Amino acid sequence: MSWENDDDLVPLRALANPLRIRIVSLLTGTSLSATEVAEELGIAHASASYHLRQLAEAGFLEQVDEQPPRGGKGRPRRRYRYDPSSGARLDRTQGRQLLHEALSVDLSRRLTEARATRMSMDAEVWLDRSVWEEVAGLIDQAVALVHDKAGPPRSGDRIKVSMTALLLELDDAR
């Protein structure tokens, strides 16, 4: 399915799965094959391949540089990488609860795996709009930096990190 189809929930449903969120995160900054994804996440190759195809059909991943198989026999290995522009195309009004639930499950997994917390904060406050816009801009810059500088797992002097950013404008329900 493509982004132009009538079913606006397809992209959201494709991502509303904790394993798929992990796959998208893994493919930020690098392209990997189903075999590499399966090895990294400890899942079956068939499962990795299925989830990669679903994410690609929903527009979250793009297929890149098919490599010839080792030894020159067999089909080329498909590689996928995250399309950073895909998040901007999500319909955020329908079904977002599914996505938030999947993100919450994955955040629980990450918190369990964390060996150190670099920063944690929570606030429900009132800010001047200009300050709020400045904060949002800084978070946008941080997210872009993380995505731009992400690379393949276990290469060089890289460390595995997690960044979750959720900025919410709340209703003034009294």
Image: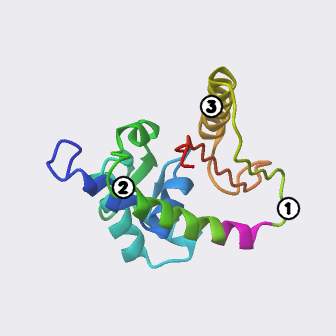
Circle 3 residues within 10 Å: few <14, some 14–19, many ≥20 = some
Q: Amino acid at mark 3?
A: Ala
Q: CA distance from mark 2 to mark 3?
A: 36 Å
Q: CA distance from mark 1 to mark 2?
A: 35 Å
Q: Secondary structure at mark 3?
A: helix
Q: CA distance from mark 1 to mark 3?
A: 25 Å
Residue under label 2, please give it: 78
Q: Earlier in the sequence, mark 1 or mark 2?
A: 2
Q: Amino acid at mark 1?
A: Ala
Residue under label 1, please give it: 116
Spot occupied by residue 109 in the image (x, y as percentages of width and height): 64, 72
Residue under label 3, please give it: 136
Spot occupied by residue 55 in the image (x, y as percentages of width and height): 35, 57
Q: Nearer the viewer, residue 157 or 92?
A: 92
Q: Residue at x 35, y 48 (%)?
A: 93
Could one spot residue 70 in this view of the protein? no
Q: Earlier in the sequence, mark 1 or mark 3?
A: 1
Residue range corresponding to the magenta coloring: 109-114
Circle 1 residues within 10 Å: few <14, some 14–19, many ≥20 = few
